[in-house]
Image (cartoon, rainbow, N blue to C red):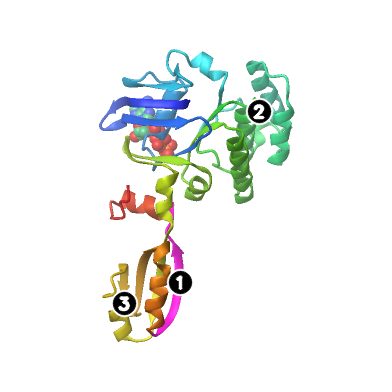
Amino acid sequence: MTAINIQQLTKDYGKNKGIFDISFQIEEGEVFGFLGPNGAGKTTTIRHLLGFIKPQSGKSTILNLDCWNQSKEIQKHLGYLPAEIAFPENMTGTELISHAAKMRGLRDMTKAEQLIGMFDLDPSAQIKRMSKGMKQKVGIVCAFMHDPQILILDEPTTGLDPLMQSVFVKLIHQEKQKGKSILMSSHLFEEIEGTCDSLAMIKQGRLISVMNSQDFKQFDKSIFKITFQNFQDFQAIQKEGFIISEIYKDSLQVVIEIEDLQINELIRTLSKKDVTSIREMKYSLEDYFMNFYKGEKHNHV
Ligand SMILES: Nc1ncnc2c1ncn2[C@@H]1O[C@H](COP(=O)(O)OP(=O)(O)OP(=O)(O)O)[C@@H](O)[C@H]1O
């Protein structure tokens, strides 16, 4: 079953701001990354899913329930972590977690306690005295503690240190194994590459790319920076039919992009030349993303 379905969703704030004709689906058990630069429309899309915004046109559903008309019913199955958490400051973390549990009618706090341990959180502090990362951890506990079927996480690792980011990635893998459907907006490409089955990229309110795990395989691509000992070999490599993305004449260096299957061909060719050094740079989703936003080539979709 489709867990989240967004169909031609549009909210025009004027001056080309808002979201326009957004469509994508997230299946049950799928982890879906939502990537885009600041102001691209990620939060606006997510706020529609939460039932906070009425669509101008198009619609979105979660578990076949309409996000605008049936948001109360959806809430029972949903965990939400907002990008900017506005907590009541005069509470401790423990009070807030208990309050959130009570609002949901949740009595079993086993999962909340597990999450507190996993993220090494001391929730007894006053929220107003908590660091950004601590508040984020409280938000994570509140989003996951009732074991929801659907999770919507807006920039979930904001404020978390690298160790805690890796704990978070572990949590996402655990939830995925349990069959949860997760929508996660992020700027952290490694996180998306390492956790998501599919992703959508949004720019200026419009989807520019939707990829599934098959498309991810295109990133089984490597980039090598090769330095030659002499000008002849440096010139000759440029005529061998490889994709050369950069040339540095002064240092006799070229940057070659190859599919992983071409590696033997490259080694054979280089074995006949005088090479000073070979340095591998993995072609990552980040390269793809940055190139896309710079409007450069590498459009693999
Ligand atoms: N209520 C509103 N009225 C007018 N414009 C709005 C409103 N809400 C959002 N916008 C504009 O819509 C665009 C999309 O904003 P949105 O917050 O969805 O982006 P985002 O991708 O979540 O960005 P960020 O990564 O910075 O959080 C922005 O230009 C924003 O200024």
Contact between marks 1 and 2 (CB within 8 A): the answer is no
Name the kind of residue labelled 1 in the image.
Answer: Arg
Mark 2 closeness class: few <14, some 14–19, many ≥20 residues within 10 Å: many
Say what secondary structure mark 1 lies in: strand
Q: According to the image, label 2 marks what residue?
A: 145
Residue nearest the viewer, comparing 271 with 83 = 271
Residue nearest the viewer, comparing 91 with 224 = 224
Q: Is residue 150 above or below residue 222?
A: above
State which quadrant residue 9 falls in: top left
Question: Where residue 298 sits: x, y (%)?
Answer: 31, 55
Magenta stretch holds residue 94:
no
Q: Alpha-carbon distance for marks 3 and 2?
A: 57 Å
The circle drawn on residue 279 is 1
The residue that appears at 33% across and 30% down in the rendered structure is 22
- Name which of mark 1 and mark 2 comes first in the sequence: 2
State which quadrant residue 148 falls in: top right
Question: Where residue 166 sits: x, y (%)?
Answer: 61, 48
Question: Where residue 274 sits: x, y (%)?
Answer: 39, 85
Which quadrant contains ligand 1? top left
Say what secondary structure mark 2 lies in: loop
- Name which of mark 1 and mark 3 comes first in the sequence: 3
Q: According to the image, label 3 marks what residue?
A: 237
Residue nearest the viewer, comparing 231 with 91 = 231
The residue that appears at 69% across and 35% down in the rendered structure is 115
The circle drawn on residue 98 is none
